[in-house]
Amino acid sequence: MDLYKDYLGNVAFIQVIKRGTADILEEDDCGLFLFDTRGEVYMLKTDDVEKGRKWLIKHEDRDYDIMMIYNDELIDFAKERYGFTEEERCYQGVWTKPEAPPLKGLLDFRVATMYDVPFIKEYYEDWYATHGIRIIAAGELFIAMLPGSGASGESCGAGAHYDGGNPDEGVPSQEVKVGFIGMHPEGSTGLLFVLPEYRKRGFAEEMEAFMCAFALEQGLISYGHVKVENEKSMSLQKKVGVEFWDGMMSWVFK
């Protein structure tokens, strides 16, 4: 399957193959079925519904827990056969330019540590229950702060100072947190949250630009999923300059 013929639609597959975490289970000229060993998620995209069903059945001894599926009929099939009770319908957006959008200096950033867990859980409860520790350990979750309020006024990444962080380090008491953003284990950008008192000041756009730069610095692709009902997020992504695939996909899980 030539994934680059539909770059916007296949970017999730390209990402995990690019970083070497793809266990390819099945592939032909019109589809691909793989398991991302880092994100621990199955990804399926094919126009051939019958073949997609056969692929799923062939490997169903793997006990599917969570999947990304890019075909409506196969979404329905997987939900019925494997007992998926939850579905998140999403648009898929990609930053396609070689350079990240410029930062405006509105925020400083630092790598999140385990000391940040209570703060994050207060606003994003489901995050820690799923894969929070893995994201922190990977150094792919960031705390956004008002400029100069962090330790020594230092920030990280995206053209500023980046020290990789340490999950055992404490949190400077003087910092003023604005929110957080990160990269999911399968490689998509997300986890964006801005505290209510700091909204409508351009901070969400700045955080998106920062994560785009971070992904590109790691040699990865900056892409993400937006739930179909989240009009504010869609508007933000388009404002930043993200391009969207003309189809939709679904996350299904139990």
Image: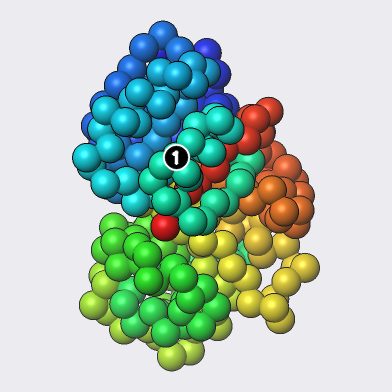
Q: Is residue 230 above or below residue 102?
A: below
Packing grade of label 1 (10 A; few <14, some 14-19, many >=20) is: many
Which residue in the rendered view is the most extreme toward the front?
A: 81
| Quadrant position of residue 133 | bottom left
In the image, is 8 to the left or to the right of 29? right
Q: Residue 221: image x %, image y %? A: 46, 36
Query: Pointer 1: what residue?
Result: 78
Quick one: quadrant of the N terminus?
top left
Q: Is residue 182 above or below residue 133?
A: above
In the image, is 58 to the left or to the right of 94? left
Q: Nearer the viewer, residue 249 or 10?
A: 249
Which residue in the rendered view is the most extreme toward the bottom?
A: 173
| Quadrant position of residue 81 | top left
Whether residue 186 can be seen here: no
Q: Residue 175: image x %, image y %? A: 49, 83
Q: What's the residue at 65%, 61% (across, down)?
A: 204
Q: Residue 92: image x %, image y %? A: 59, 38
Q: What's the residue at 61%, 45% (across, down)?
A: 90
Q: Nearer the viewer, residue 250 or 254?
A: 254
In the image, is 175 to the left or to the right of 205? left
Q: Nearer the viewer, residue 122 or 48?
A: 48
Quick one: quadrant of the C terminus?
bottom left
Q: How many marks?
A: 1
| Quadrant position of residue 147 | bottom right
Whether residue 87 can be seen here: yes
Amino acid tagged 1: Ala
- Secondary element at tag 1: helix
Q: What's the residue at 22%, 40% (across, down)?
A: 61
Q: Is residue 18 above or below residue 101?
A: above
